[in-house]
Amino acid sequence: MPFVAWFTVVVAGLIITAAAIGLLRVLLHLKVVDSTLEQLTGGVQAVAEKTSTVPTVLPSVNANLAPVRDFADSI
């Protein structure tokens, strides 16, 4: 095989190796971003539960206040 063919194979191998390393780095960065987004989603769900609207919480508040209402009615 002539020198030019070997040189082409080596250069192509270097280019493919550089591309593979670049893609591996992108993959690792995406895994870190995925982990961060999973943690963020959990925090957002916690905030959403703590700041839920009144109609969602109202039945439990009414149930907790039922003894107070009954006592006030008996007076």
Image (cartoon, rainbow, N blue to C red):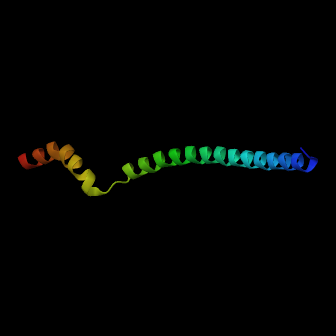
- Residue under the image location 21 percent in, 43 percent down: 64
Q: Quadrant of the N terminus?
A: top right
Residue extending furthest front?
A: 1
Left or right: residue 37 versus residue 25 is: left
Residue extending furthest right?
A: 3
Identify which residue, 29 or 23, lies in the foreground.
23
Q: How many marks?
A: 0
When asked about the image quadrant of residue 13, the answer is top right
Q: Is residue 35 visible?
A: yes
Left or right: residue 48 versus residue 4 is: left
- Residue under the image location 77 percent in, 45 percent down: 17
Identify which residue, 33 or 55, lies in the foreground.
33
- Rendered position, 52 above or below 39: below
Could you tell me residue 34's position as x and y percent? 56, 46
- Residue under the image location 15 percent in, 45 percent down: 66
Could you tell me residue 7's position as x and y percent? 89, 48
Q: Is residue 75 visible?
A: no
Identify which residue, 66 or 21, lies in the foreground.
21
Could you tell me residue 9's position as x and y percent? 83, 46
Left or right: residue 26 versus residue 66 is: right
Left or right: residue 17 versus residue 43 is: right
Identify which residue, 8 or 14, lies in the foreground.
8
Residue extending furthest left?
A: 74
- Residue under the image location 46 percent in, 51 percent down: 44
